[in-house]
Structures are given as structure tokens and as C-alpha cells.
Image: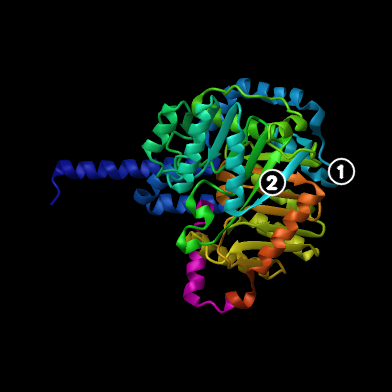
Amino acid sequence: MLLPDTRDLVWLLFFLVYALAIFSVVHVLRNYRTAQGAIGWIIGLVSFPYVTLPLYYLLGRYRFEGYVAARRVEDDKVTPLIETLARMAGQWICDPPSNVDELKVITQLVRLPFTHSNRCELLIDGRQTYQSMFDAIRSAQHYILLEFYIIRDDNVGRKLSDLLLERLGAGVRVYFLYDDIGSLGLSRFYIGKLSRAGAEVRSFNEASKRPKRLQINFRNHRKILVIDGQQGFVGGLNIGLEYLGAAAKRAPWRDTHVRLEGPSVLALQLVFSEDWYWSANEIPTLSWSIQPQTDLAEAGKTPAGKGLGKAAVFILPTSAADEFDTCELFFLNAIGHARERIWIASPYFVPDLQIINALQLAALRGVDVRILIPVKPDNLLVGLAAYTYLEMAARCGIKIYRFNAGFMHQKVLLVDDRYAGVGTANLDNRSLRLNFEVTAVVCETTFVRQIESMLVDDFAHAQPFTLDDYERCSPWFVLACRGARLMAPLL
């Protein structure tokens, strides 16, 4: 039996929990981005406040509040970099090519331009990507910028560390940025070894930096490598053995990266600089000039005789700190303006209704809409929720392919014969609204054809998903799928 004082404490706790729940409901109503997400949180806060309250304050916020506030301050720091980019790369800055004029609105959203005279190299899977990245690191003369969601302390991670230590010994500066959640298992020994050798190492959302922040729902999912401002890499691969197909349950691993040369690298460098400022409260001293391609050839960084590239490239950074849902707007813009085809490869397919409706409308007007996903996702809830979207897609002629030659992790977009995107953004709520992502959008005939050829080969290693496949599922499985879909705003 509870003593009087104990009963008073219980009632006080009960009152405080429900008062905080009501306050949180008001916060949801003032800040929600999607009605379905808001409804889910409100039901949970009212019905199960003891469970939902801690989840809401860990996972439920819709804006990266500390970053938004910091960006108001950092504009004085970062805006001059944008002006420097415009001045140093002025002769390479261009409007979107005439056949992709619809992308102009997206460039205005992120304040980064298209640049011409870039060279783009498609990198397929881990061995090709790591060889190219590690060769580039070996060639570094001034600085190396690294930003990855996941860095493992395994054979691949240690190979990276050894290369960085060697370049540090040669006087090359290293700026090393990783995500706290994605790289949760990264050892202090690994970080300390680099730091003691002179590397600048930061975690993206380290709690000691500013008094913010239980904001683990917002993750830096970007994968960026920049060498001397002259070579840049972006795509789906993190640093770890699984990306070489060493994870038994998901081997072989299927992924895509791109190597850039030319003025687009400076835009990628600007994205890194903004993230570094958030984490370290400083802007690194970097080169913002375009080194002639002949000089690069003489330095052994690029094959002689190739000269300037021909690709128009746009670097698209998106995040929860954006004023608009830029990542979703980019996909909606691409889907809405596709004339002949739109092919999307994403390991996670849990979009919102706007994306589904846009894909359905494209298919109904005769566009060849194809979605490539893995047959076995690495996240059970994501896999279950995806089934309900697959059914909605298949009903209107969208072609769904489930890759069955390993785990498909690439994030690739192909629109007609006009442009392709290679980056870090998945087709799920987390990438569309919460994560910090980056995509290289490339307009160049040869590169687009290479993407097409790569995806055609991927489709050949995938099994089509049909309505019959869904209808053959047991009622219990369908119920589990529809239940998982209720979690879509958090997946």
C-alpha cells in the first residue's frame, strides 16, 4: 500500500508527464511537416506518454534546430565562400543546360550553380571505388577532406588510416568528419592515432561542441572526399569491409560512386566546409582556384591528353536545416518533368504519398518508370513497409525490380537521356526530410549512357515484382506490412 507521501509523488509524476505530453502535442501541431507523422506522434503522446515522450524528444523533431540557428550566424562565414566560389570559378559557372532547364529552381534553392567543363568517372562497387579514392589520397599535396556517415575500424578503415598517416607525415593537412550515430563503433584508438599525427578530427554532432542537443534523429549521411580542391568523390559507399562484399548475409555488395574533376569539386568542397564549420566552429583554409588539367596530368593525378571535361555538373546538398524540403522537391521535379523514362535505384523505398502520386502520374502518362530495390533489405521494418508502396506502384504500371545478386545499396537517378544523379539520398522519409545528403547531378551524354548501361545490367540481375506477388502473401504478412507502414515517417 502506498504511503500518503508516495501517492502524492505518483500523482505529481502523472501530472507532469501528461502536462509535458500536452506541451509536446502543441509542439507537434506548430511544427509538423506531414499530417501522417503528426497524427502518429499525437496518438502516441496522448495514449502512451511514458513511452512516446522520450522517443519524441530523441526522434520527433522536424528541424535540425541547432544547425538552423548556427546557419544564421555562419552566413557571415559561409557566404564569402560562395562569393569566392563564384569569383574563382566564374568562367565555369553556367545556367542549367537548355534540356534540363527545370533544374534551375533547384539550384536557386541551394545557392549553388551548375558548372561546365567537368570530368566524371563512374565507379561501380567497392574495389573500383576504394582503389580510385585511395590513389587520389596518395596523390594529395596540400589537404584531404573526408566526410563519411560510417567509418569502420576494420581492414578497409585501417587502410584509410594508414594512407592518411603517410600523407600527414608528408605535411598534407587532413580534415576528418564522421557521423556520431553511423560511426558509433569507431574506436577512440583509431581517432586518437590520427589526431596525434596532426589530423583535425571531428564528429558531426558531438555533444560537447554546443549546448543543444539530443538530436539523434538528424544524421550526416553524406559521403564526401576532396583532394586539394581538384578531385572529388561522392556516392553510396562508406568506409568498411561490407562495401567490398565481406558481410556474409549481404554479400556481394552492389553500390555506385562518382569521381569528379573540375569546378564542381569546389562546390563539393563548399558543402564540406559548411559541415565542418558546424562541427568545429571554424572554416578550414582551402584552395578555391581551378588548377589547369595539364598541371594535373603532370602531377600524375589525371591521364595526360584528356584536357577539360565536357560534363555540366550540379552539386545538390540537402538537409533538415533547409527552408524547404529540398530533397523531396528535387525528386518531385525530376519525376514531374520526365518525358520518356525515370529510373531510380534506392535500397530503401518508403516514400510519402506525394512521391508515390508523382510516380503514378508519370507512369499513367506513358513514362517508363522503374524502381530498383534489394530483394532483402537490411532493415526489417523498411522491408515490410516497402511492400505496401510496391503494391500501390505496381497497380498503375510502375515497374518494380528487386535486385537478387547481393545487397543493392546504390542511390542513382536517371531521367530520360538528359541527366543522371549519383549520391547519398534514399527514397525514404529520412533522406527526404531528416538526413544531411548530397547528390552529384551530371548532364553529359557519355556519363548518362554509362549509367543507363549499368542499370540495365542491374535490372538483368533483379526479379520483377508484380501484383500477383503481393496478393499471394499471407494475410498476416500483409497486416505486418501495413503496420510497419505506420512507422514510415520515422524510417
Residue at (75% x, 24% y) in the render: 88
Mark 1 and mark 2 residues within 8 Å of each other at the beta carbon: no
Q: Which of the labelled discs sits on residue 98, or is there none? A: 1
Q: Residues within 10 Å of mark 1 (few under 14, many from 20)?
A: few
Q: Earlier in the sequence, mark 1 or mark 2?
A: 1
Q: Secondary structure at mark 1?
A: helix
**Above-or-below relation of 305 to 82:** below
Residue that carries the numbered disc 2 in the rendered image: 329
What is the distance, in whole Å, between disc 1 and disc 2 at their CAs?
Answer: 20 Å
Residue at (38% x, 45% y) in the render: 54
Q: Main secondary structure of the magenta part?
A: helix
In the rendered structure, which amino acid carries the disc numbered 1? Answer: Ser
**Left or right, 304 with reference to 201:** right
In the rendered structure, which amino acid carries the disc numbered 2? Answer: Leu
Residue sitting nearer the eye, 164 or 416: 164
**Left or right, 239 with reference to 190:** right
Range covered by the magenta-colored residues: 471-490
Residue 428 visible within the image: no
**Above-or-below relation of 25 to 195:** below
Q: Which of the labelled discs sits on residue 54, or is there none? A: none
Q: Residues within 10 Å of mark 2 (few under 14, many from 20)?
A: some
